[in-house]
Image (tube, grey):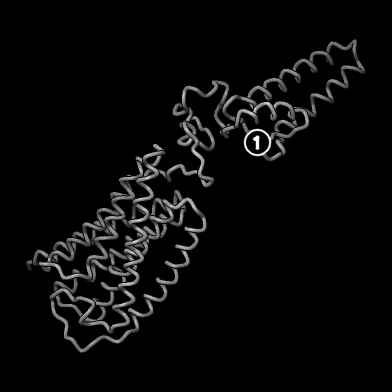
Amino acid sequence: MSFPVPVLTGFAGVLVAAVATGVLAGRCVRQPRIGFIVWAGAALALTIALAAQSVGLARGFGPATFRAVQLFGLLLAPLWLAWGLVELVAANEAARFGMRLVSGALTVLGSVVLVTDPLTAQPFSKAWPLSGPYYQPISHDVLGAVQAVAVLAAVASVALAAVRARRDPAWRSAMAAVVSVGAAVLLTAGLRFPLPARAAYPLVSTLAAALVWFGASRLREHPATRRDGRDDGNLSAVSGVITPETADKLPSSLPSRLVAGCSLRRLAPNQTSAAANVLTSGYAALAGSGKRNPAVSSTAAPTETTAAIADRHAGSRLARTAARATLATAARTATACTAPSTSCEIGW
């Protein structure tokens, strides 16, 4: 039994979308972020939509396959892809929270309308079923509004990522993922318009799934973003905890005394001396706030205790040796914690 080209294209698209779903599901396990979770849901929605397209193009569409294509392919897929882009790009917590509210509301409202709205008496066939002839006006309007929100969010996310890529090198490697997923949003939204050939619809859906797969594979890690809007310079790509694997990626300007397990934080010039001045009290004035450093406190306390013991037992060689060793440890801690460009936080 031979299948026409549109059906074969739809079957191939199901495989591509299923692989993209698996890739994103694995990413969600390793990095459980909201953006990756909704992208995995969008890839799953494309898989279901492509399966419904293949069945409809092979045997003829019906109410079930029509609703599956419209709900998963034209509503959920573009909306969730755009939602994931906003989660990835937006640095403002209010913007991300607002997108979550809007996307959640549109998901529930649009799904209820598209599933429960009565269809018209227009008969189905193997031709691609556009939403206009089969849906009531309210379903058509809801679908258009959801796709408009998705397209606007995708375009704004791509533009914002492009602006950031000009200033932050960490975003340049993420631009391929952002652009590819943004293009997938436009392709899935374009399924509602008349296309010149029947095979174009599964081809466009397959291309959208491939772009999602490509974007997920190109985004190795979440780009380093500063929530406070400041530029970290050379530290922007290596902020966080230093591990042996990432130690070789540190800029050469950093002090060689930094070791694996330390976390980096840039200090202003006037904060370095302030941290040194309050070392004995166990406080480090980092970023303008006095935060208790247990490592400094645990170093300062034994120093004072040992010094007191040495005073009481001035003739004891053991006391003098212990005092010298403890004072040397305190000096090394002070040097590492008051480096010119970083602070070494051990156990904050």
| Residue 304, placed above or below residue 24 | above
Q: Along the line of sight, which residue is nearer the eye, 345 or 45?
A: 345
In the picture as drawn, the residue positioned furthest to the left comes out as 2
| Residue 168, placed above or below residue 323 | below
Residue marked by disc 1: 286
In the picture as drawn, the residue positioned furthest to the bottom comes out as 121
Residue 3 in percent (x, y) is at 9, 67
Picture quadrant where residue 258 is located: top right
Horizontal side of residue 236 vs 290, given as left or right: left
Q: Which quadrant would the C terminus be assigned to in this image?
A: top right
Residue 128 in percent (x, y) is at 16, 73
Residue 245 in percent (x, y) is at 46, 31
Residue positioned 74% across, 30% down in the render: 278
Q: Amino acid at mark 1?
A: Leu
Residue positioned 83% across, 22% down in the render: 306
Picture quadrant where residue 264 is located: top right
Horizontal side of residue 278 vs 255, given as left or right: right
Q: Which quadrant would the N terminus be assigned to in this image?
A: bottom left
